[in-house]
């Protein structure tokens, strides 16, 4: 009998198809680490693009504003991938202090997380004693590969007016609309929001420059009276801002860079609500879904929106109202966010530790994600492939 070493290797195309049939990213990473020929296939750009098109990145865990990672814990399905990422750093802390500059300089505040998307993390700092109307210092970091890019200030020539402390400053990462370009290029969106208007600037890593992208006025209709209280979500190529006290949401189509106002479902007892979220449905006839979490009784209501309705519609445009039971009775729940096909819920129970759950929006299966020592606020969802399947993003 021929030894294993003398047996011919499978063609790369066959190996690629076999690896794509494995259950998850952690399984592929283990197979690649165990065999040189597998590693060669996995590192090929073609394989990475195919793999990413078939499987979303696992939800590694939740990031606190200070940069501490709270990884997914067993028996959560993402725990193996999270263990591989978190094991690189003692205690699960991402090493922002090891690669970001000047963290301890007295003139600045510490770097803090303000967004996470596509394996990247957006961080900000400000000068101590500086007006709240000043633009923040920004950096984009790739924690897996310990790389960062400092974002230059927005130039004065595209800032047409002074901003006041009464306005809300909101920087966040744009989504990668093209998977291949999204691996090496990114954009940062920066909103200045008042009760009457939004000005939006965009930084592109491809050009290294800012541009004035769009603006939007809430006048004269004032369908949203207090835009500064809105909470941002991403779904179906759009950023959406919602609040339980509003009957409309603000939508930014990222590809067109246009704002619009969209009516929300006409649910009764609007003040009996603990959380709202907008999510991508992945359905052929609907790209936006809407989740409503009620306090009494503890139910999660899901709605879908017709894809052919291009904004401005009202409550009647929402359909397929579904009721989903919450995972552990007796908890007081709120919605943390939505990402990668799931909702993340926070559950609190008297005299017990706060627990976090993921709810798959296709199967409605709930899994406990983690139970940190204390509640995480704000919490940023961090999803990423293992380092073998995740080339540097900066």
Image (cartoon, rainbow, N blue to C red):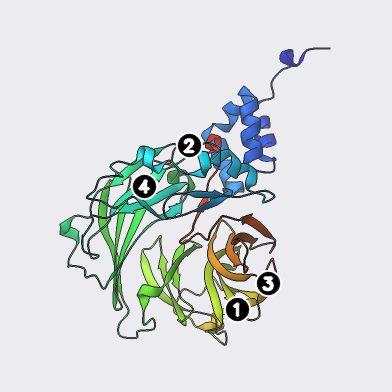
Q: Which of marks 4 and 2 is nearer the N terminus?
A: 4
Identify the residue position indicated by label 4 in the image: 140
Query: Is the Cβ of the residue at disc 2 closer than 8 Å to that at disc 3?
Result: no
Identify the residue position indicated by label 1 in the image: 295
Residue 233 location, x and y as percent? 47, 65
For the residues marked 1 and 4, what is the alpha-carbon distance in whole angstroms? Answer: 37 Å
In this rendering, which labeled residue sits more in front, label 1 or label 4?
A: 1
Q: Earlier in the sequence, mark 2 or mark 3?
A: 3
- The local crowd at label 4, few if under 14, some if 14 to 19, many if 20 or more residues have their Cα within 10 Å, is many
Identify the residue position indicated by label 2 in the image: 391
For the residues marked 2 and 3, what is the alpha-carbon distance in whole angstroms? Answer: 43 Å
Query: Is the Cβ of the residue at disc 4 closer than 8 Å to that at disc 3?
Result: no
For the residues marked 4 and 3, what is the alpha-carbon distance in whole angstroms? Answer: 40 Å
For the residues marked 4 and 2, what is the alpha-carbon distance in whole angstroms? Answer: 16 Å
Residue at position x 70%, y 35% from top?
18
Residue 279 vertical position relative to residue 136 in the rendered view, above or below: below
Horizontal side of 92 relative to 105 (left or right) equals right
Residue 13, can we see it?
no
Q: Please, what secondary structure does the residue beneath circle 3 have? A: loop
- The local crowd at label 2, few if under 14, some if 14 to 19, many if 20 or more residues have their Cα within 10 Å, is some
Residue 345, can we see it?
yes
Q: Which of 50 and 174 is in front in this view?
A: 174
For the residues marked 3 and 1, what is the alpha-carbon distance in whole angstroms? Answer: 11 Å
Q: Which mark is residue 330?
A: 3
Q: Which of 71 and 159 is in front in this view?
A: 71
Q: Which of 70 and 173 is in front in this view?
A: 70
Query: Is the Cβ of the residue at disc 3 closer than 8 Å to that at disc 1?
Result: no
Residue 35 location, x and y as percent? 64, 24
- Image quadrant occupied by the C terminus: top left
- The local crowd at label 3, few if under 14, some if 14 to 19, many if 20 or more residues have their Cα within 10 Å, is few
Residue at position x 46%, y 43% from top?
94
């Amino acid at each position: 009998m021929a030894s294993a070493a003398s047996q011919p290797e499978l063609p790369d195309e066959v190996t690629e198809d076999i690896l794509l049939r494995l259950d998850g990213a952690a399984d592929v990473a283990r197979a690649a680490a165990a065999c040189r020929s597998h590693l060669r296939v996995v590192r090929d750009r073609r394989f990475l693009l195919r793999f990413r098109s078939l499987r979303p990145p696992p939800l590694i865990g939740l990031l606190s504003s200070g940069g501490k990672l709270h990884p997914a814990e067993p028996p959560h399905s993402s725990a193996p991938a999270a263990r591989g990422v978190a094991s690189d750093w003692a205690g699960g802390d991402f090493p922002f202090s090891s690669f970001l500059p000047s963290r301890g300089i007295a003139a600045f505040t510490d770097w803090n997380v303000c967004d996470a998307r596509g394996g990247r993390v957006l961080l900000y700092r400000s000068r101590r004693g500086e007006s709240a109307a000043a633009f923040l210092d920004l950096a984009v970091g790739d924690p897996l590969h310990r790389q960062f890019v400092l974002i230059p200030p927005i130039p004065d020539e595209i800032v047409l007016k002074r901003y006041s402390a009464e306005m809300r400053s909101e920087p966040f990462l744009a989504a990668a609309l093209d998977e291949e370009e999204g691996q090496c290029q990114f954009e940062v969106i920066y909103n200045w929001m008042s009760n009457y208007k939004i000005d939006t600037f965009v930084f592109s890593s491809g050009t290294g420059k800012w541009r004035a992208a769009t603006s939007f006025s809430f006048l004269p209709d004032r369908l949203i009276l207090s835009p500064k209280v809105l909470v941002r979500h991403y779904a179906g190529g759009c950023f959406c801002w919602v609040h339980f006290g509003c009957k409309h949401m603000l939508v930014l189509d990222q590809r067109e860079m246009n704002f619009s106002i969209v009516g929300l479902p006409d649910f009764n007892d609007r003040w009996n609500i603990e959380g709202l979220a907008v999510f991508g449905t992945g359905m052929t006839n609907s790209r936006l879904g809407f989740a409503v979490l009620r306090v009494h009784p503890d139910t999660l209501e899901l709605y879908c929106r017709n894809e052919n309705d291009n904004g401005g519609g009202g409550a009647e445009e929402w359909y397929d109202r579904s009721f989903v039971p919450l995972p552990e009775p007796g908890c007081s729940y709120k919605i943390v966010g939505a990402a990668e096909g799931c909702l993340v819920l926070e559950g609190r129970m008297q005299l017990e530790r706060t627990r976090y759950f993921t709810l798959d929006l296709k199967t409605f299966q709930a899994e406990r994600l983690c139970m940190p020592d204390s509640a995480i606020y704000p919490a940023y969802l961090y999803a990423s492939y293992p380092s073998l399947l995740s080339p540097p993003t900066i």
